Image (cartoon, rainbow, N blue to C red):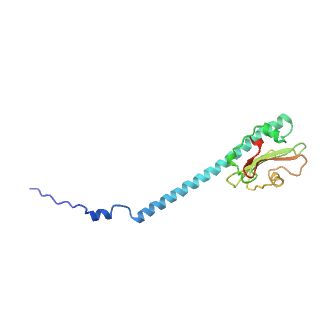
Amino acid sequence: MMQFQKMTHFTPAHAASRAGFTIVELLIVIVVIGILGAIVLNTFASARERGYESAIQSDVRNAAQKIKAFHAENGYYPNTASELAGLKLSFTKDAYDGTVNGMIYCTITGGANERFSIGGWSKAGKRGHYYSSASGLKQTTSWTNTNASLCPLLNVDATAPGYINHWGLLGGNNWQSWTN
């Protein structure tokens, strides 16, 4: 004859003591989730900053091509807001820092020093990018709100005869009409 052993069952008191996670287990999970969240947010912010930088580089490069084409056709660089507006320049406006004078076009018209530069300061607040007819596409970690100091930084002498500048973005996120 077979004998069956009596099976033991959890008592309600014992089951209640193992019904959930311990506080230590919960804290470990919370810490791991926090660390993963910080990594994801840092990666996202870094990618967004690189996007701002790339957009400004592309804008400046495209504007430079249109300005050079204007020069080839007319024999001088555009020097009025209406001539700049006629180029139908396009800018990725949300990539620029609107809290400062964040975009500028500088030129010297006529003579041996004839040149132009166009540049913008990234919303990331770490770098500006510009194109100079004297040196090509460059970046800078300096940016000022005055054309007299910014244009020379961008390879255009603000004291030279024929010097002209046009801000495209003034502080307060005030884009000028020639920026489209």
Q: Looking at the image, is 165 positioned above or below residue 16?
A: above
Is residue 48 shown left or right of residue 153? left
Q: Quadrant of the C terminus?
A: top right
The image quarter containing residue 92 is top right
Q: Position of residue 174 (x, y in %)?
A: 74, 48
The residue sitting at 19% across, 59% down in the picture is 7
x and y, in percent, of residue 47 in the image: 61, 50
Q: Residue at x 77, y 42 (%)?
A: 177
Residue occupying the point 86% across, 37% down:
75
Check the picture and name the quadrant holding the N terminus: bottom left
Taking the image as shown, residue 46 lies to the left or right of residue 145, namely left
Q: Quadrant of residue 136?
A: top right
Q: Residue furthest left?
A: 1
Q: Decide: is 90 above or below 141.
A: above
Instruction: Tell me where residue 117 appears, x and y as whole percent.
Output: 80, 46
Instruction: Give coordinates of residue 141: x percent, y percent.
Output: 73, 55
Indicate whether 81 appears above or below 41.
above
Total of numbered circles in the picture? 0
In the foreground, 47 or 30: 30
Q: Quadrant of residue 14?
A: bottom left
